[in-house]
């Protein structure tokens, strides 16, 4: 039997995926907003900025999983540009995808801008090794625009407690 954990006891990692932010050409406004949103929800948050690319994204996610973060939210790299490879890096690490969360983010995002439909972001779980018991890391990709981070967190924020409880083996009540 599991007991839902309060967000304050859960670690979250905010990952900004951006060539320009990682090399200092652009301020990481989206990452800052993401950290603020996660902290407002009560999570203990650390932040990392990585360049665009499959390996940089997969590496940041793997590091967060090894550090037993319960939640990783990425911002950036979900569009159609040649360097927008966040979904590909995420897919390399996920154990199980959750298309419903990604579809919800796109659908609700389209209420603000039609460009939300272009996002290829994923959501899903990276299961922890069975010897560690039930648990895992929920990963959610958000677009890189600051407004998309605010909107995306408004969409998924109310669902996080339930989803993380489920990932840990919680009942379906």
Image (cartoon, rainbow, N blue to C red):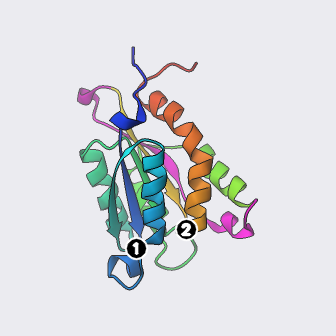
Q: Residue drawn at (38%, 67%), measured in percent from left and top?
A: 54
Residue 83: image location, x then y, percent: 46, 77
Q: Is residue 63 left or right of residue 58?
A: left
Quarter that holds the N terminus: top left
Location of residue 59 in the rendering, given as x and y in whole percent from the top left corner = 29, 60
Circle 2 Cα neighbour tier, 10 Å, few/some/many (<14 / 14–19 / ≥20): some
**Residue 165 in sight here:** yes
Please tell me which of labels 2 and 1 falls first in the chain. Answer: 1
Q: Is residue 40 magenta?
A: no
Q: Is residue 146 above or below residue 136?
A: below
Say if 30 sits above or below 42 in the image: below
Boundaries of the magenta span:
111-133
How far apart marks 2 and 1 lie (CA) works out to 17 Å
- Residue at position x 53%, y 31% from top? 162
Q: Which mark is residue 146?
A: 2
Q: Is residue 113 above or below residue 100?
A: below
Q: Is residue 113 magenta?
A: yes
At which x and y percent is residue 35? 42, 56
Q: Residue at x 24, y 46 (%)?
A: 66
Q: Position of residue 58 (x, y in %)?
A: 34, 60
Q: Which residue is mark 1?
A: 52
Q: Which of these two is toward me, 136 or 162?
A: 162
Task: Specify the label residue 24 is tagged with.
Answer: none
Left or right of 106 in this view: 93: left
Q: Is residue 59 left or right of residue 161?
A: left
Residue name at image x 65 percent, y 68 percent:
118
Q: Quadrant of the C terminus?
A: top right
Secondary structure under the numbered disc 2 in the rendered image: helix
SS class, disc 1: loop
Front label number (2 vs 1): 2
């Amino acid at each position: 039997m599991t007991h839902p954990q309060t967000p304050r006891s859960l670690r979250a990692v905010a990952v900004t995926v951006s060539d320009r932010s990682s090399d200092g050409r652009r301020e990481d406004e989206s990452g800052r907003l993401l950290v603020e949103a996660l902290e407002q929800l009560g999570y203990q948050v650390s932040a990392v900025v990585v360049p665009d690319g499959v390996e940089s994204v997969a590496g940041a996610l793997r590091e967060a999983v090894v550090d037993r973060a319960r939640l990783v939210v990425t911002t950036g790299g979900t569009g159609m540009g040649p360097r927008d490879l966040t979904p590909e890096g995420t897919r390399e690490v996920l154990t199980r995808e959750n298309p419903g969360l990604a579809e919800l983010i796109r659908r609700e995002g389209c209420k603000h801008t039609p460009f939300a439909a272009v996002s290829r972001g994923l959501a899903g779980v990276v299961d922890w090794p069975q010897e560690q018991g039930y648990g895992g890391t929920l990963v959610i990709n958000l677009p890189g625009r600051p407004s998309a981070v605010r909107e995306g967190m408004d969409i998924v924020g109310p669902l996080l407690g339930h989803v993380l409880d489920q990932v840990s083996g919680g009942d379906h009540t």
